[in-house]
Image (cartoon, grey):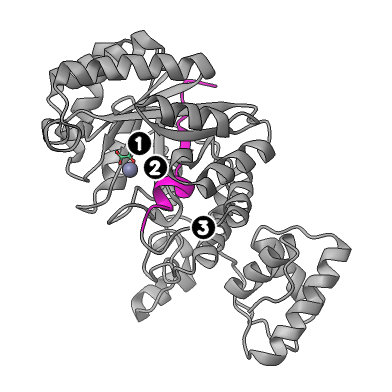
Amino acid sequence: MSEDRVKIFDTTLRDGEQSPGCSMNTAEKLTMARQLEELGVDIIEAGFPIASAGDFEAVRQVAATAGPSVTIAALARASQADIERAAAALEPARHPRIHVFLATSDIHLEHKLRLKPEQAMGRIAESVRLARSFVDDVEFSCEDATRTKRAYLCECFRAAVEAGATTLNIPDTVGYTMPREYAEIIRDVRQAVGEGPTLSVHCHDDLGLAVANSLAAIESGARQVECTINGIGERAGNAALEEIVMALQVRHDLVPLVTGVRSELLYPTSQLLSQTIDVPVQPNKAIVGRNAFAHEAGIHQDGMIKHALTYEIMTPQSVGVPANRLVLGKHSGRHALQRRCEELGFHLDAGQLGELYRRFTELADRKKMILDEDLIRIVHHMEQSLPSVI
Ligand code: KIV
Ligand code: ZN
């Protein structure tokens, strides 16, 4: 991989799924994983196998069906049972990664883990070594890194590298840091561990800074960013994948780095997730919200009519928002349906289009207007061979 590339580590199926009301069953996780792969993410964190039999099975099936270009990660606490379970779930993966974590801040060590700092350090070395006995690709995270004493944080990461960790993740677990401080932490960790390991960032949005913090860290040398579709995740959520990807794309002049993401699949992926977990996307959500490309004020509309770039820094098409706003209803034909599907990123053969049209007209008899969300749901159900749609 070239130097100027930032790896996208998608944790929609793990941290994202941990947020209330966002859980997914195995079939849903498989469909999302396929879409994430198509989108072009580098790593899919598929779950936390020790958490439940369902999570184990979902990770195993995602690992078994993943294509050759994506790494599948499974989360494990720094314990033998967790690591063995993660390794078993990842067994069918072509590119498996075990992601081990242990909290390192005083508040977590004292009140949650009841461990002395030197005991925690021993645990880090032992667990990373164990994970390395199963796979070559091991990520280690110091949970609550941004509230961990800096010198101790660096020592923990050095211990992880000596034990074989290849990626070091520096999570802002409680969404506490700010861009300048986070950038400084990244620089300090880099200085402590040298150039070998990839530095990763993982930000929560408690202060609404997850994306800003992630970008500051990237500018400071991080080359993996952990994020979720629509920014779902614990509490206020994780950094939104679509915002990070488009910030890097639109401001390539300021931050000359690339990702492997096909930006025109961002909107369809966002819609698929929203449909799958039945959680709507906030209308003014950057990049993928319903109003992200809507212009209401007269002065803006006037500018847009004269030249779209007056009020748009990217085109709707560049993120997969259909440019044509034709309304689909029961009088719409196959061609209009096929075109809208292509704009949404679905390329169907004649047989699939026929089946889609049949289901579409059935629904259009009951519903006046067919929205993008309805089409995505129909295609999603067809893929799973489910009979009814709504
Ligand atoms: O927020 C966090 O610290 C996490 C870790 C498990 C990486 O999700
Ligand atoms: Zn997290």
Left or right, residue 309 beside residue 299: right
Query: Which mark, by number, is residue 231?
Result: none
Residue contact between numbered discs 1 and 2, judged by CB atoms under 8 Å? yes
Q: Quadrant of ligand 2?
A: top left
**Labelled disc at residue 251:** 2
Of residues 13 and 129, which is closer to you in this image? Answer: 129
Between 143 and 86, the one lying in front of the other is: 86
Choose the circle earlier in sequence order: 2 or 3. Answer: 3
Amino acid type at image mark 2: Arg
Please state which of the two labelled residues, at mark 2 or mark 3, is closer to the viewer. Answer: 3
Q: Which mark is residue 254?
A: 1
Q: Which residues are magenta?
A: 1-19
Locate residue 70, reporting x and y percent: 60, 33
Question: Quadrant of the image for the N terminus?
Answer: top right
Q: Earlier in the sequence, mark 3 or mark 1?
A: 3
Image position of 34 (left or right of 330): left
On screen, 273 above or below 45?
Answer: below
Task: Please identify the quarter of the rendering in which residue 271 is found.
Answer: bottom right
Q: Is residue 3 magenta?
A: yes
